[in-house]
């Protein structure tokens, strides 16, 4: 007559005090075995599968579709069936209170009006008259993930001191470059934006910080978060090490992140801790938009659609005016613009084969090899001496890319 | 002799008064049979009981040694034995009881004899019957049990060869004493002309009963010199003349005219005096007899209904187990209740082993066992009688209506009869027409009888507790076969609040969790679960959100909760498993109509007026179900 295991709602995500029990796979009193997946917990960012560690009889102290507080016991594994079912009384009492009842004429009317059952959540009985008298706006239920999203965005925005600046970036040259250089996102500026931004943030630390209780907190490191929203809601997925990786590596990271999103394999660490978010709406045909700043951040960069005729893309930066200001952010954007526009294919003669050098010579900044440079029609690598007196090789793009 | 003369003179006087119209009703004189009464009553001791019949004056006078209050009774005066309520046939004084139903008092007398035996008092009970009474079945049922259980009961049969005006030869087959012998009962025979033998014989039969605690039957041949009650005597004049001549008192008057005259005039002058006084005496006030008692208002504090882990039958059994442990006057009786069977529905499980001397298994004699229960009740015990199937209650009706119901008022509130009869009603088991009925409507509306019905929302122990602790008058508890196996409040309908009042007989009230109800459904007993099943379809199809009122007590009914609900919803539906005509629904709707002025929609939902068939498909259509509830309500909304 003992409880073999208790499962509580774990707190993996900072600032979230509850999760939703998205699914339960068994019912109270069922026999379960070690390793069985028994429930799914969802937060605003991800879904966690709960597995049991013992054989026994499961008791759910939670209900599918309802929230559970962090730290609350939601599942118990008993060593006998009777104990598992013991509190069915209470569950039944509670259960009898849920579950709105609809009359058949109400259901017909709702279908005609296009009303969803969820607008009547909390009602006990809904008749046709209730449907006729329903004066609320058509709305869908706000699911848990959206709720948490609202919560995490609201605090930052609520100070109402946000502002957006924008800049046009010529894209002809960078897209030409992308076409040859990139493998997957051959018509996208995104990997380059990430590459440049990650490095620029070192120069603009205020954009890698956040407002907190009257003060500014600077993040120790840069962690670029990429907003991805395909089918499972908006999630900001981390791209770690963007400030040291090559564009190609960043491209690959983007691809992997998107896949993990689609396969629902994201874990808590993937979706928390970003210091600066980039959101790419270029595929949506959006001309201009003002993205919202994420939690513990002071700015967010949005990429709107690429105008084919004018060969340009609009970058918008929303920033928290408590931390930085328009001038500062304008400078950032100008910087970024310059870097992006410097990606060009110089009209140079291709190297003669005799001058091929070994592939292990690379630009110390962007890791481009001589092969890469030659392929792209670049001139070559320059030898330079850095501040510390070390000899390094650098490519022309990177020379152009920084002061 | 003097005693006998006294009786005769009183009887003659009463007959005179009757002819003068000074007595109301009828009169049955025992002129000619006086010595029979005298012979037996002289051997009674304190604590013995006498039960008599319509021809009881002689028995009474010789028992009480007084006639004053008898005359007052017949003259309808308040100072009478029963304040004029009972009159000639229904007398009660101390341990003397008479009633006007032939044979009806015989099992009651046996019940009292059993009570005295259980109390180990050494008392006996005498019951006087006539030869005509030997036509009644209960007499034989009782003889069977008296012999079986060795009851100290003496049945004195005053055989005057006539039942009213019908000669015995037309009514009685075979031999009287051979009947008695068949039950293993000792018999005695005497007559009222050989007085010495009669006196000795009576002494010995009484001694036999008292000493051995065994029943006996004493046949006393006699002759009634006056007519049965009033009017002309249609018997053969020559026969009458013959018996008048051999009548001992008449002989005495001839042989000792002086003494006779002396005694007579003494008695007469006293009688006249008494009667003169009584003429102007007052009659009983209506107020003292019956007050329209609205009763105290029921407790209407509501609390939530909780589910139980135990089944209903287990809870009932548990009640009796605990109650019998605490209260030694509780007798649990019924057919087939001994362990290991424990009764047809196992309510008595284990009881006969725990309380062997208070669990009484009975033969199949519903009428008499009810009478015996009545007797136990008036003699200070708390009998709980189980009638195996509600359908058999028909056999108990005389004892319920003409005995248990009447005792209190008939005997001017001198006795109460706290008998409890429990029985399961209900169909849906395919038991067929005589084992599936809901005969509740025949059991309600009986004076002084409270009728309660168990249901699946109220713990039966609460109801039985009230019955045991608060009721002093007869109670019928209607149980339900199909409900025995259910747990309390196991069926939960979505979004409904389940509450019960804290009254002695709780009313269960179910209403939607948030919405206002738009109809009132009143039900009770075995129909509760079906009504609960109907809630879903009722809303789904008709958008009816009923408030469900479940009564525990169905007679008398507390209408307050129903009224409050109907005033709000203005729709009243009463659902019962019995048939429609003159049933519980009729009663409730007419009462509510009286209270509300009738401006409501009302329907009765009940069984079709046809015997319940055993075949499942038809049974489901005859008895009310979810479909019929929805149909009836749908039709009412048009």
Image (cartoon, rainbow, N blue to C red):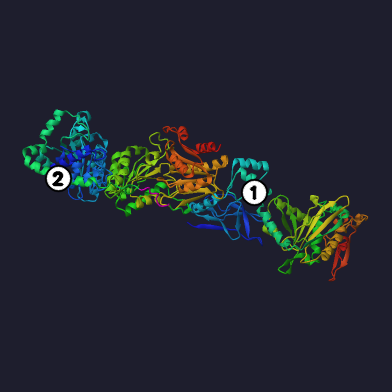
Q: Quadrant of the C terminus of chain A?
A: bottom right
Q: Is residue A115 above or below residue A17?
A: above
Residue A119: image tag: 1
Is residue B207 in view from this perspective? Answer: no
How many other residues sit within 10 Å of disc 1, few (<14), some (14-19) or many (≥20)? Answer: some
Q: Closer to the camera, A33 or B185?
A: B185
**What separation in Å lies between label 1 and label 2 (alpha carbons)?**
98 Å
* Contact check, label 1 and label 2, Cβ < 8 Å: no
**Chain to which mark 1 belongs:** A
> Where residue A345 sits in the image (x, y, percent)?
89, 55
Residue position for label 2 = B269
In the image, which residues are magenta? Answer: B291-297
Q: Main secondary structure of the magenta part?
A: loop
Mark 1 element type: helix
Q: Residue at x 28, y 40 (%)?
A: B368
> Where residue A270 sits in the image (x, y, percent)?
70, 58
Mark 2 element type: helix
> Where residue B68 sits in the image (x, y, percent)?
20, 47
> Where residue B221 sits in the image (x, y, percent)?
15, 35
Q: Residue at x 43, y 50 (%)?
A: B506
Q: Residue at x 71, y 60 (%)?
A: A154
Q: Closer to the camera, A206 or A118?
A: A118
Numbered label tally: 2
């Amino acid at each position: 007559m003992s409880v073999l295991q208790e499962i509580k709602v774990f707190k993996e995500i900072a600032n979230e005090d509850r999760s939703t029990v998205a699914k339960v796979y068994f019912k109270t009193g069922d026999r379960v075995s070690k390793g069985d997946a028994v429930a799914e917990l969802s937060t605003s960012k991800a879904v966690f599968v709960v597995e049991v560690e013992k054989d026994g009889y499961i008791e759910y102290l939670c209900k599918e579709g309802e929230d559970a507080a962090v730290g609350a016991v939601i599942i118990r594994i008993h060593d006998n069936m009777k104990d598992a079912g013991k509190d069915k009384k209470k569950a039944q009492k509670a259960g009898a209170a849920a579950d709105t009842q609809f009359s058949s004429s109400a259901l017909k009317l709702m279908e005609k009006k296009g009303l969803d059952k969820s607008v009547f959540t909390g009602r006990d009985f809904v008749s046709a008259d209730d449907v006729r008298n329903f004066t609320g706006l058509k709305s869908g239920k706000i699911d848990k993930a959206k709720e948490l999203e609202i919560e995490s965005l609201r605090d930052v925005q609520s100070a109402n001191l946000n502002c957006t600046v924008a800049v046009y970036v010529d894209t002809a040259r960078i897209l030409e470059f992308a076409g040859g250089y990139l493998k997957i996102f051959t018509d996208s500026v995104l990997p380059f934006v990430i590459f440049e931004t990650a490095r620029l943030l070192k120069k603009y630390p205020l954009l890698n910080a956040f407002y907190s209780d009257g003060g500014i907190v600077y993040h120790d490191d840069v962690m670029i978060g990429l907003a991805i929203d395909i089918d499972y809601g908006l999630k900001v997925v981390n791209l770690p090490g963007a400030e040291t990786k090559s564009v190609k590596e960043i491209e690959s990271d983007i691809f992997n992140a998107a896949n993990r999103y689609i396969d629902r394999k994201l874990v808590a660490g993937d979706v928390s801790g970003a210091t600066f978010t980039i959101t790419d709406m270029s595929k949506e045909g959006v001309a201009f938009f003002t993205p919202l700043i994420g939690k513990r951040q002071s700015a967010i960069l949005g990429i709107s659609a690429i105008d084919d005729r004018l060969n340009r893309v609009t970058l918008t930066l929303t920033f928290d005016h408590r931390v930085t200001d328009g001038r500062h952010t304008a400078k950032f954007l100008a910087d970024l613009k310059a870097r992006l526009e410097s990606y060009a294919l110089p009209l140079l003669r291709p190297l003669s084969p005799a001058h091929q050098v070994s592939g292990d010579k690379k630009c110390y900044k962007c890791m481009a090899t001589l092969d890469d440079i030659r392929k792209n029609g670049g001139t070559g690598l320059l030898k330079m001496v850095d501040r510390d007196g070390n000899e390094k090789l650098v490519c022309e793009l990177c020379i152009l890319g920084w002061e | 002799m003097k005693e006998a003369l006294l009786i005769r003179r009183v009887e003659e006087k009463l007959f005179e008064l009757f002819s003068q119209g000074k007595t109301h009703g009828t009169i049955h004189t025992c002129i000619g049979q006086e010595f029979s009464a005298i012979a037996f009553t002289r051997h009674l001791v304190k604590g013995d009981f006498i039960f008599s019949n319509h021809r009881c004056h002689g028995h009474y006078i010789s028992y009480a040694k007084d006639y004053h209050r008898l005359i007052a009774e017949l003259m309808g005066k308040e100072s009478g034995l029963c304040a004029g309520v009972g009159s000639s046939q229904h007398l009660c004084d101390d341990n003397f009881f008479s009633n006007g139903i032939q044979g009806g008092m015989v099992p009651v007398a046996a019940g009292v004899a059993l009570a005295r035996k259980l109390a180990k008092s050494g008392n006996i009970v005498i019951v006087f019957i006539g030869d005509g009474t030997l036509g009644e079945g209960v007499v034989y049922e009782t003889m069977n049990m008296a012999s079986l259980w060795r009851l100290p009961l003496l049945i004195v049969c005053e055989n005057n060869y006539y039942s009213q005006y019908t000669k015995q030869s037309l009514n009685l087959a075979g031999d009287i004493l051979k009947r008695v012998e068949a039950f293993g009962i000792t018999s005695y025979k005497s007559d009222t002309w050989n007085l010495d033998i009669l006196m000795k014989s009576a002494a010995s039969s009484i001694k036999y009963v008292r000493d051995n605690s065994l029943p006996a039957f004493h046949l006393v041949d006699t002759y009634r010199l006056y007519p049965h009650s009033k009017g002309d005597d249609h018997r053969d004049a020559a026969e009458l003349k013959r018996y008048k001549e051999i009548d001992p008192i008449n002989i005495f008057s001839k042989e000792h005219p002086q003494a006779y005259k002396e005694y007579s005039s003494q008695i007469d002058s006293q009688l006249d005096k008494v009667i003169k006084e009584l003429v102007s005496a007052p009659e009983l006030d209506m107020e003292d007899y019956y007050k329209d008692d609205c009763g105290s208002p029921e407790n209407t504090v509501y609390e939530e209904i909780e589910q139980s882990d135990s089944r209903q039958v287990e809870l009932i059994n548990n009640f009796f187990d605990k109650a019998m442990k605490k209260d030694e006057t509780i007798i649990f009786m019924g057919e087939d209740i001994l362990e290991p069977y424990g009764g047809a529905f196992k309510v008595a499980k284990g009881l006969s082993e725990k309380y062997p001397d208070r669990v009484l298994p009975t033969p199949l004699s519903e009428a008499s066992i009810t009478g015996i229960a009545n007797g136990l009740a008036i003699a200070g015990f708390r009998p709980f009688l189980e009638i195996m199937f509600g359908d058999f209650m028909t056999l108990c009706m005389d004892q319920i209506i003409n005995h248990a119901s009447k005792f209190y008022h008939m005997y001017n509130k001198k006795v109460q009869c706290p008998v409890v009869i429990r029985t399961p009603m209900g169909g849906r088991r395919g038991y067929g027409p005589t084992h599936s009925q809901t005969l509740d409507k025949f059991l309600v509306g009986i004076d002084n009888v409270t009728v309660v019905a168990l249901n699946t929302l109220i713990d039966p122990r609460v109801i039985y507790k009230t019955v045991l602790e608060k009721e002093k008058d007869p109670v019928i508890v209607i149980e339900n076969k199909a409900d025995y196996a259910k747990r309390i409040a196991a069926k939960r309908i979505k979004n409904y609040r389940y509450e019960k009042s804290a009254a002695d007989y709780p009313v269960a009230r179910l209403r939607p969790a948030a919405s206002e109800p738009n109809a009132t459904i009143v039900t009770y007993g075995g129909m509760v679960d079906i009504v609960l099943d109907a809630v879903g379809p009722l809303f789904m199809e008709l958008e009816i959100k009923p408030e469900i009122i479940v009564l525990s007590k169905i007679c008398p009914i507390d209408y307050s909760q129903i009224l409050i609900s109907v005033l709000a919803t203005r729709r009243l539906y009463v659902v019962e498993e019995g048939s429609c005509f003159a049933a519980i629904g009729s009663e409730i709707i007419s009462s509510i109509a009286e209270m509300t002025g009738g401006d409501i929609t009302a329907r009765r939902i009940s069984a079709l007026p046809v015997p319940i068939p055993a075949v499942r498909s038809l049974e489901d259509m005859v008895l009310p179900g979810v479909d019929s509830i929805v149909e009836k309500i749908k039709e009412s909304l048009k």
